[in-house]
Image: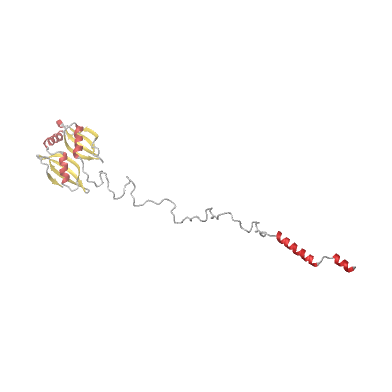
């Protein structure tokens, strides 16, 4: 019958609907999970993947303290007011040198230096004592028989650094020097002490024993404050005769 063939050849509508729903659910299950990532123009994934702690442009950990621009780039400079060692020398510092031009009034050991000159000459009496160079002192001695000998002695070490040498003088000078050496009761060291005491801050520069009429005197040059004074000391009494 025609009606019977139509029902046997066609699929009923409810069955078609059920199949469509099942296919849709199956497709949905296959497409589960993360959506397909999109790509940039260069093919890199647009979804970033963390690789650990973030770093700065220089590779330092982002959490590290930044370097201060005010931090010194080297060691601190020395205090300009600090003194240089030693031995360097600072302006206004006192000098330990007793050399010329330092303004020191340190006394000269006339007795010790003179004694070295006498020893070098083989004995006698000092009749002249004078500065020689930065550290030397020339000591003139009249020995037995009137012969004169001179030596240069260091003021620092009190050792002979030159001489002794015989000093040649004319007969009249030799006789006068010998007479003065015999008559003097005040030696060179005593005369130096007396003369420097007569000038405030004085420093002895030279002494010379000589005759003045019938008496004998020491003529002493004393330096003080850049000025040279002449002090005359009686070689018999030890008193100051004059100061200029």
- Left/right of residue 4 with respect to residue 123 in the rendered view: right
Above or below 155: residue 43 = below
- Colouring: secondary structure
Residue 115 lies in quadrant: top left
Residue at (21%, 37%) from the top-left corner? 138
Which residue occupies the extreme left position in the image? Answer: 214
User: Front-most of 24 and 215?
Assistant: 24
* Residue 124 against residue 36 in the figure, above or below: above
Quadrant into which the N terminus falls: bottom right
What percent of the width, then of the height, locates residue 25?
A: 72, 62
**Farthest residue in the bottom direction?**
3
The image quarter in which residue 7 lies: bottom right
The residue positioned 75% from the left and 62% from the top of the image is 22
Q: At 86% from the left edge and 65% from the top edge, which residue is drawn?
A: 8
Q: Nearer the viewer, residue 103 or 129?
A: 103
| Residue 142 pos. (x, y %) | 16, 34
> Number of marks in the image?
0
Where in the figure is residue 37, as x and y percent of width and height?
Answer: 66, 59
Of residue 38 and residue 205, the one placed in the foreground of this image is 38
Residue 242 position, x and y percent, is: 13, 46
- Looking at the image, residue 44 sits to the left or right of residue 25; the answer is left
């Amino acid at each position: 019958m025609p009606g019977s063939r139509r029902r046997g050849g066609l699929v009923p509508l409810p069955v078609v609907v059920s199949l469509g729903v099942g296919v849709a659910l199956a497709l949905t299950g296959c497409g589960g999970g993360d959506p397909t990532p999109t790509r940039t123009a260069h093919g890199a994934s647009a979804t970033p993947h963390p690789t650990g702690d973030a770093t700065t442009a220089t590779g330092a950990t982002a959490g590290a303290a930044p370097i201060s621009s005010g931090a010194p780039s080297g060691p601190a400079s020395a205090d300009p007011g600090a003194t240089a060692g030693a031995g360097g020398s600072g302006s206004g510092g006192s000098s330990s040198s007793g050399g010329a031009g330092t303004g020191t009034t340190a006394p000269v050991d006339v007795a010790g230096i003179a004694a070295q000159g006498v020893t070098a000459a083989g004995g006698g009496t000092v009749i002249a004592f004078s500065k020689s160079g930065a550290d030397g002192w020339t000591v003139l001695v009249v020995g037995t028989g009137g012969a004169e000998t001179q030596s240069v002695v260091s003021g620092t070490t009190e050792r002979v650094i030159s001489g002794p040498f015989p000093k040649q003088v004319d007969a009249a000078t030799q006789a006068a020097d010998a007479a003065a050496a015999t008559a003097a009761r005040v030696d060179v060291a005593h005369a130096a002490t007396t003369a420097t005491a007569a000038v405030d801050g004085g420093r002895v520069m030279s002494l010379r024993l000589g005759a003045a009429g019938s008496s004998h005197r020491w003529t002493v040059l004393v330096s003080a404050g850049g000025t040279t004074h002449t002090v005359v000391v009686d070689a018999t009494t030890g008193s100051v005769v004059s100061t200029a």
